[in-house]
Image: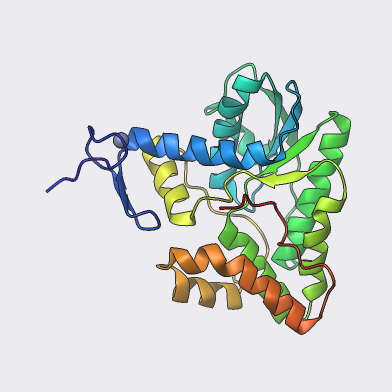
Amino acid sequence: MIKKCSICGKRDAYIYRQSSGEYICNKCMDRVIMKNVKKTLAKTRKLSSNMNILVYGTWLAPTESLIAVRTVPRVESRYKAHVIISVPREMSSYVRNIVNPESSVVVYNYVIKKRLLADCILEDIDNARKIALDNSVDVIITPYPRMLLVKAGLQAIMSGRSDLVKASRQVHDTAPPVVSALFRLEKEFILEYAYASGIPLLQPKHACSDMGAGIILLNVLKDSHEVEFNSLRTLEVLTDFVEPSDNSSLIPFREEKQ
Ligand SMILES: [Zn+2]
């Protein structure tokens, strides 16, 4: 029997969202994404409107990047923010099909380097900061899903590079702030949403797709959203265990208090 959507109560459900126990229709999935992105952005919004916002697309999380470039401008249009979209050159054709034709799109060249994923993320953020500086940006929005950050952290720790996890915690110390738009959403929901919305499911490009520890963890935990949502905290404890630190703030993006 087809279930009705738990949110609108009218349309047929498209997915069952395990983390909330809801059946959700296609249209309400969009509402859930919008609501969560809005909440995450509200956390960093200063009271002024008319901000310059950079949505940074990356091959480290391509499908999530496409969702972010589609969603953030819709959320921000209510605040008269100026949204600049920045994507790797090879991703720009996908982006053009998704965003408003008048959108400002800055393309950059992405080179795959063989290094740890945490290195790639930090390099990505450096690159985003350069683009932000050139465009007087107030806030940088990244698309990294939680699980990617967890995998990056685990891989770094297991490679004896817990300094990278610490460095990622310090991302907030430099302006402009960096916010991960989809941080409140679990990976499964993000991918279901992409599929339902006709957003291409693109393979991430980086030199560390075979990530050992991360892959093992993912296989063990893939059905447990609760673990996914607590995993960054676990990672933080693990890093402090390996190399104690005074700074125990969560890595590396803000999260709204529940
Ligand atoms: Zn619905």
Q: Front-most of 108 and 156?
A: 156
- x 42%, y 68%: residue: 224
Give the image location of residue 18, x and y in percent.
35, 58
118 relative position to 213: left or right: right
Question: Residue 217's spot in the image, x, y percent?
Answer: 53, 75
- The answer to which of 121 and 26 lies nearer the viewer is 26
Residue 151 appears in the figure: no
> Going by the picture, which residue comes out furthest to the top?
102
Number of numbered discs present?
0
The colour scheme used here is rainbow
Residue at figure coordinates x 30%, y 39% from the top left: 25
Does 11 sit left or right of 229 as displayed? Answer: left
Tell me where residue 88 appears, x and y as whole percent: 69, 41
Q: Quadrant of ligand 1?
A: top left
Q: Is residue 167 at all visible to an observer of this figure?
A: yes
Q: Is residue 212 above or below residue 53?
A: below
Q: Looking at the image, which residue is at 70% across and 81% down?
A: 158
Residue found at x 49% / y 69%: 227
Percent across and percent down for residue 209 are: 60, 65
Is residue 27 placed above or below 237 in the rendered structure?
A: above
Q: Is residue 253 above or below residue 84?
A: below
In the figure, is residue 157 to the left or right of 62? right
Left or right, 16 with reference to 88: left
Residue closest to the far left: 1
